[in-house]
Image: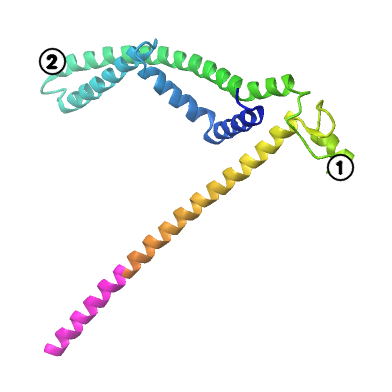
Amino acid sequence: MPSLLLVVFVLQVVIHLVNTVGAPVINEFLWMLWNKLPYSSTSSDVRLQTKRRRELVGLKQELSATSAQDQFAKWARLDRQYSRMQAEYDTKANDLKDNRASFDRIASFLRWGGTNGLRFFLQFWFAKRPMFWIPRGWAPWYVEWILAFARAPRGSVSIQMWFVACATVVQLVGQAVAAGVVLVGERQQGMGQRREKVAMGAGQGGRDRGKGDEKKEL
């Protein structure tokens, strides 16, 4: 069984990633993944909608290229076909929209249960269990009381405080990584701009030398 210290840390990392990425992005990814499964209830409808969308685009282009005056019979036939297919597409799109709303609610509930819900459960279930002990006399009594908050034995670190410590470390590391990525991107962009300036300067110098040689020949 994995250590509870490690479980809490990993759970806090997952919570941080979920909050950073955002619920809409996660739901969109899960919806796309669900529709690619062969046994899902909406995969066939999504594929059919994609096919209908392509057919609608093709009919719209053909209808636009057909003259209503010179080819009225063909234009009327295409217009009826386009209207019928558009109505079917809109009806199925509304059904898929309702299915997507239900899917988002279920995904949000499961995501909350697997992150914050699990965190609350662990904090309640292991409220009296010390994560680890600190050396005797290492901190004043009020610091020991804070570290043991709310129900852990005095002289230990409670699961609540361990969650707080993990959240702080994960957030600081996340901010440092984000700042490093931005710094590397700006440095690469600056190097690219300097290369362009050097290349432009070399090209301008070559043109100036060419003009000087032409003047000497004259």
Which percent across, then down, holds residue 142? 88, 39
Residue at the disc numbered 2: 73
**Mark 1 residue element:** loop
Query: The N terminus is located in which quarter?
Result: top right
Say whether residue 73 is left or right of residue 99: left
State which quadrant residue 123 falls in: top right
Left or right: where 174 falls relative to 147: left
* Along the line of sight, the residue nearer the viewer: 19 or 135: 135
Q: In the rendered structure, which segment of residues is drawn in magenta?
A: 199-218
Q: Earlier in the sequence, mark 1 or mark 2?
A: 2
List x then y, in percent, for residue 77. Answer: 17, 14
Q: Which residue occupies the foreground of this view, 93 or 67?
A: 93
Q: In the drawing, what numbered circle is on residue 108? A: none
Mark yes or no: residue 218 visible.
no
Q: Residue at x 89, y 39 (%)?
A: 141
| Residue 190 position (above or below residue 218) | above
For image coordinates 21% across by 81% down, the residue present is 209
* Res 207 quadrant in image: bottom left
Residue at horizontal 38 percent and vertical 66 percent from the top: 194
Q: Amino acid at mark 2?
A: Ala
Residue at image mark 1:
137
